[in-house]
Image: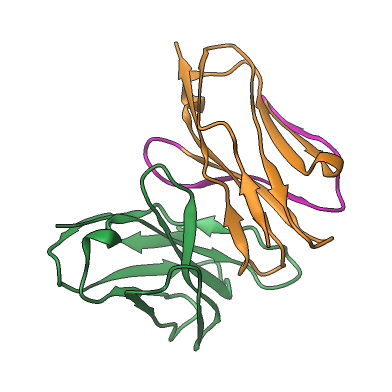
Chain colours: A green, B orange
Amino acid sequence: NAGVTQTPKFRILKIGQSMTLQCTQDMNHNYMYWYRQDPGMGLKLIYYSVGAGITDKGEVPNGYNVSRSTTEDFPLRLELAAPSQTSVYFCASSAYRGTGNTIYFGEGSWLTVV
Amino acid sequence: AQKVTQAQTEISVVEKEDVTLDCVYETRDTTYYLFWYKQPPSGELVFLIRRNSFDEQNEISGRYSWNFQKSTSSFNFTITASQVVDSAVYFCALSEDNYGQNFVFGPGTRLSVLP
């Protein structure tokens, strides 16, 4: 079972470059999320989506953009990368109401901005 | 506001020892969910358990057990007869709603199991 798949796994960006982290899930989950995990820290929510066409900001949205054109895909765009965005990024998803809200995570994307 | 505290930053034990990872949470809601996730050195996040606030039964799964006590707002995790493969960062998390928007993680506890 694929679950939540995110790419790339590793990436080095120069300051000011832009890139998109791809995320797709095959569990037909309505809810999707992007988190970042800074070294030695817990996770912080960047953006989330409750369904196709609907997105909302989390705790740390500045410097990021998302879109949700399909149920399966939830890409995260970094515009004008900054060293502060060096982090590990996790995409995640959870089912709609009635089945609880266990969040399943992708394997993470390690991003370094130099 | 919700908050999750994992006071133990790092724990080291010798293989076969038992170890308990502490988790204390804060919430104003009467309905909430608690979670434990494992993050091994490879980096992925692995779901271990979910508990809702109305179910205070302790749970055992193999060498893992969880002690949920609403009176002390704690959801502690015990590994019995620890193994080297248990070495990981363990995160406790809290969700106040059914859809995960307010899903808060603790800072994590790094467990090192030495052979």
Judging depth in this view, the residue of A77 and B7 nearest the camera is B7
Q: Residue at x 48, y 47 (%)?
A: B45
Q: Position of residue B77 (x, y in %)?
A: 67, 32
Judging depth in this view, the residue of A23 and B9 nearest the camera is B9
Q: Residue at x 32, y 74 (%)?
A: A63
Magenta stretch: give its range: B40-63
Above-or-below relation of A87 to B49: below
Q: Position of residue A32 (x, y in %)?
A: 52, 70
On the rendered structure, is A35 left or right of B47? left
Q: Quadrant of the rendered structure where residue B48 is?
A: top right
Q: How many dots with numbers?
A: 0
Judging depth in this view, the residue of B48 and A60 nearest the camera is A60
Quadrant of the image containing the C terminus of chain B: top left
Q: Is residue A1 visible?
A: no
Q: Tell me if residue B47 is in the magenta stretch.
A: yes
On the rendered structure, is B34 left or right of A72? right
Identity of the residue furthest to the bottom in this view: A53
Above-or-below relation of B48 to A60: above
Above-or-below relation of A52 to A37: below
Q: Residue at x 47, y 27 (%)?
A: B87
On the rendered structure, is B33 left or right of A112? right
Q: Tell me if residue B29 is in the magenta stretch.
A: no
Above-or-below relation of B10 to A17: above
Q: Residue at x 78, y 44 (%)?
A: B73
Quadrant of the image containing the N terminus of chain B: bottom right
